[in-house]
Amino acid sequence: MEDIFGPEGVLAHHLQDYEPRPGQQQMAAAVSELLLSTVESNDSAPDWTSALAIEAETGLGKTLAYLIPAVLSGRRIVVSTNTRNLQDQILKREIPFIREYIEPDLKALCVKGRQNYLCLYRWHQLSAAGQGELFDDSANQRIVGWIEQTRFGDRAELDWLPSQSPLWQKICCQSHFCLGGDCPDGPQCFLNRLRREAANSRLLVVNHHLLFSDLAVRRGGYGEVLPRYEAVIFDEAHHVEKVATQFFGRSFSRYQVSDLVGDIERSALKDLSRHRQKELLKKVHALSGRMEQFAALLPLEPGRFVLQELLVSGSELMEKRDGLLRAFAQLAEGLDAVGKGQEPWAQYNLRCADLQEQLEFITTESFDDLPEEENRFIHWFERREKNLVLSATPVDVSEELQASLFSSVAACVFTSATLTTAGDFKYFFKRMGLSDDTPSLSFPSPFDYAAQTLIYVPGDDFPEPTGHGYQQALHTQLKLLIEAAGGRALILFTSFKALDLAWQALKDDLHYPLLRQGTAPRHELLRRFSSKTDAVLFAVASFWEGVDIPGESLSLVIIDKLPFEVPSDPVMMARMNRIKASGGNPFYEFQVPRAILTLRQGVGRLMRSSGDRGVIAVLDVRLFSKGYGRRFRNSLPPSPIVRDTDEVVRFFKHTKDDDDQRK
């Protein structure tokens, strides 16, 4: 790796502004050693312990540090990311560079979920039906022209089509509509073309959702989404547990039922005789009615709630559930009689059977006498504004990862800027089901936090978040800090309620361009914020990570309080109960580590380049007043910690003076 990453290596000669970093070279060497040692023999059974965890903070250059060894290994490797931005960076920046200077014959491909690609059969069916309410002549002509020149029919190429377009939902590839080998458009199918290309590619770039979709399909014996691969590199690996939880669980929703009902109704009215229409639609409407009866017996309050107690105590609810299951079975019989195995009726039948199976699994009463640590799933439901979702979620995904991932590939690399809590990987290893002696590396950011940043925490007289006068004190601090920085602030809140209260308290007192999450799409808010040098952005949730704004536009990151999650969430409760039943302490073993990882993501929004300077303000005195505060402090960057706002004012004054001198 010295010939590539060293002071006289390929990167130094050909990559603009490249600075050789020992950590980057060490990471590349470790990834290379793992890949070469574990995939040398195709005959050897995969060893689930062949894993490597690497924490590489911002500025190290970790993407090239794993991509180059992956390419040079000569094996088919999947790189899995959590965000589209990182996928785009890999494909548009890193891969072209590697092809030009390191591996000219590299075949790399981005593979997305099938709903991202056009289904020619569905497009031709929709066009023939003349459903003009979905698209006008102009849109029709633009898609026709696009189909003639696109390679894979990727929806991302249609930048003029709204993100929530009902048209795309009708013409994209979906498994329950796929005719497989019987499709008349099979030879020209974009998805088939993509799969052939993927089979000939050594490097596949996917997102976590697609990778776990592939693992779930393989485990269920239904084929595969991706061609066989020998190793997986997870970037943004701190999201792996969350995504795995979704794909190894079960779900059933009212929207899925109404979607099936609508599709059957349209096909029946178009293709069936009046008599057959009447018979089939009778069963369809019966299913809709049973669904609404069942839904009406579940509490109407929005939110997520445990389902098990309702199933045990609600005899009427179980009766309605049984009636809904019978309605699915009767509709399946009707579809079979009408279609006799022909399309689209066979696909409707499969969807009907799948929904019936999911509902039955989720609502089957579990054994109350099982020890807490033996309950594999938590059964819960969520009321949304227009939907009802029932779920069965694995309490612990480590067993699922062992069965589907670690047993099927030779090597796994997990990397992210945030994997450790207070300097160790114990929490991450436990959640992934990895042994404590799994090889790991941790590389701090090369940025000079000590000289270029401050961390501000209020003094001891500042109230704790549950204390009297906290809101007023918080808003006073926000105003003072923002004015000291001259705007240029990203304020990260732990709830929309806290954001709304701060916005109402400050919007008339701050004389800077103010931006607020929810008033425009995320990308548009970030574009506006980064285009100014005095704006203030109020945000929650998704803005805690993935915000990459180097330079003067962002010089102050404010976090209202330590980001502990609400413990009343059913999945959170189940996982905490599992730890408690095993004799552990769920607060210190689960809640604190999760909050530390989230805090580190938020803090990481400040320093995005070596020239950045600024202040990180965490307005929560529990960092010093509580015993666990030390673990949080030990997880923060090596910035000087100050507890007096005068220090912040002086910092920004000196920064401004330095900038004026350079000008």
Image (spheres, rainbow, N blue to C red):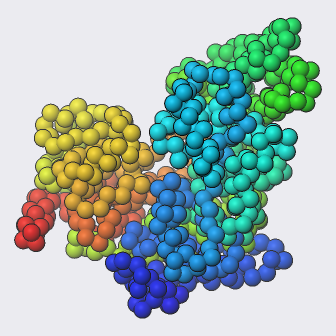
Eyeballing the image, is 359 above or below 229? above
Residue shown at 31% from the left, 68% from the top: 609
Residue shown at 10% from the left, 72% from the top: 662
Q: Is residue 84 left or right of residue 337?
A: left
Residue 180: % across, % down: 82, 43
Q: Is residue 201 left or right of residue 556?
A: right
Visible in this render: residue 308?
no
Eyeballing the image, is 510 above or below 418? above
Residue 160: % across, % down: 47, 39
Residue shown at 79% from the left, 45% from the top: 186
Residue 350: % across, % down: 82, 33
Q: Give the camera-side residue of 534 and 273.
A: 273
Q: Is residue 381 left or right of residue 136?
A: right
> Where is the C terminus found, in terms of image quarters?
bottom left
How many marks are shown on the rendered structure?
0
Residue 410: % across, % down: 73, 72
Quarter residue 625 falls in: bottom left
